[in-house]
Image (tube, rainbow, N blue to C red):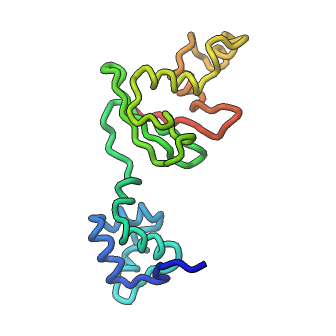
Amino acid sequence: MEFAQQKVLSSEEIKAIRQRLKLKQKEMAGFLNVSVKTVEHWESEGGAAKGAAASLLSILREYPWLLEEMRVPEKKLPLRLRYMNGNRLCTVIDVDVTARQVIVKNFVSDPVFRAFGNNEHPSYEEYENFLESRCFPRTRDKMKIMLQQLNLPFYDPFLIIQKTEGRMAEDNFRIQIER
């Protein structure tokens, strides 16, 4: 199978793509998961990008909107949760508990991997239900023992997730909490 991609990008092409995307060398390096020195080398006279980097840059040259789709937005509310599948960021959830406001951004297209499935605008109640879905049930047998093991005085899904990252035995999802 053949693909219409350049195998090698010249220093001029790399710099033009970076400038078109309005990225600094450090930002491009972060996106491509390479060092700033690597980007500097590619952009130096006689430098070039090959392999996977050339393929990804070729794609971004033709579809620059993909970069924005992958950009993690600035934190808009006091609390941020990152819903992960392994090391893959699936959904960012910003929450204001006092105002009962929730804002999400998904980074995957498959609803199975999204925190709220196809729901792009969950309510605060749906957020609370999501948290509880990532914990052992309130009605679980010997729940008090489990709470003691977690050193928690009562059942609170958020506190449980702080201790367990919302990990469940049957899947690879977890939740990282940022304040």
Q: How many marks?
A: 0
Q: Which image quarter: residue 105?
A: top left
The vertical placement of 157 against 4, above or below, is above
Q: Which quarter of the rendering shows the N terminus?
A: bottom right
Looking at this view, name the residue that lies furthest to the right. Answer: 141
Q: Is residue 121 left or right of residue 82?
A: left
Identity of the residue drawn at 41% across and 82% down: 9
Q: Is residue 94 left or right of residue 110?
A: left
Q: Nearer the viewer, residue 104 or 179?
A: 104
Q: Position of residue 115 (x, y in %)?
A: 50, 35
Q: Which image quarter: residue 62?
A: bottom left
Q: Position of residue 108 (x, y in %)?
A: 49, 48
Q: Position of residue 50 (x, y in %)?
A: 49, 80
Identity of the residue drawn at 47% across and 37% down: 118
Q: Nearer the viewer, residue 139 or 43?
A: 139
Identity of the residue drawn at 51% across and 36% down: 117
Q: Is residue 73 left or right of residue 85?
A: left
The vertical placement of 27 against 49, above or below, is above
Q: Which image quarter: residue 42?
A: bottom left
